[in-house]
Amino acid sequence: MFRSIAARAALLLFALLLATACAASGGAADAGPSAAAVAASPSPSPSATAGFPVTVEAANGEITLDAPPEAIVSLSPTATEMLFAIGAGDQTVAVDSFSNYPPDVPTTDLAASEPNVEAIAGYAPDLVVFADDPGDLEASLAELDIPALSLPAATELDDTYAQIAQLGAVTGNHDGATALIEQMGEDISEILAGAPSTGASATYYHELDDTYYSVTSATFIGQLYSMLGLRNIADEATGGAGDYPQLSSEFIIDANPDLVFLADTKCCGQSADTVAQRPGWDQLDAVTSDAVIELDDDVASRWGPRVVDLLDTIAEAVETHVDAGAS
């Protein structure tokens, strides 16, 4: 299924361009690899400005820009990473307080969870990018005639590609977006091709915080683990817990995962040492075999270009610990 992510990414890109061409001529475009992918509708022009005005079908409806934006405000750490990765960093004048990558981003005290429209407008943006609208952000920006693009949390890898394509279209960085999508596809294909087949026999626990919230295989993060054949202990949680179940310590100990991935090293100060000190956890296979992997919380919670880094970290853990004898 995942033999050629690079080819799949290229096909997605072609479908996105075809969707735009059909829309421009008034025809109906065939469905691409996913509904989110077709919704991206990037400009096919190789020029940074020749494709404008441009319209994309975003999560919050049609967004039209008459010219490439010169002052972008990003209220999403993931969107910030995407913007800089496609070459729109110079157009980005302000980002929210959680946007901390790459290191030279113009971080401010803007809060995405409680957006201050007056403060946002103070940067004179001609485009605001956000993940979620906690209230009337979009409506307030519309009253000020400020275009806003919603890029909600991805549910699958195609969503990431589609959002990158959307940003490439609305910022005039189509070529940068194309190159990034292709590179991500190639990198992921290479990681999967080099991953040991022993991963299919291993179980894992992904920890979101120190109260044992986790993810199932149906989530974006869970799908990355599945690409490497790992089996998720959280999938066995019962009681209608949803895709982000809160497990109990007893449940995790009984499941005895081969690998433990900590996505709460920053937020909650967790580490291999703190895990080993939890009552009963010192007997877990993952602890006794030093297979507790400390992740970067930011990388593990964002769906942008660094998903490649996360997948690579997981693959390295499989190669190091599962291949070394975990069952």
Image: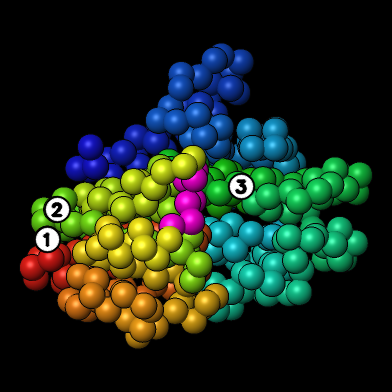
Q: In this figure, which residue is indicated by the disc labeled 3?
A: 151
Amino acid type indicated by mark 3: Leu
Whole-angstrom CA distance, mark 2 to mark 3, is 36 Å
Is 242 part of what is drawn in magenta?
A: yes
Q: In this figure, which residue is indicated by the disc labeled 1?
A: 327
Is 279 part of what is drawn in magenta?
A: no
- 130 displayed left or right of 250: right
x then y, percent, for residue 214: 44, 57
First in sequence, mark 2 or 1: give its number: 2
Q: Is residue 127 visible?
A: no
x then y, percent, for residue 179: 41, 53
- Give whichever of 256, 166 is nearer the camera: 256
Where residue 81 sits, quadrant-wise, is: bottom right
x then y, percent, for residue 133: 74, 49
For the point 47% across and 51% down, the residue is: 245
Amino acid type indicated by mark 2: Ser
For numbered disc 2, what is the local secondary structure? helix
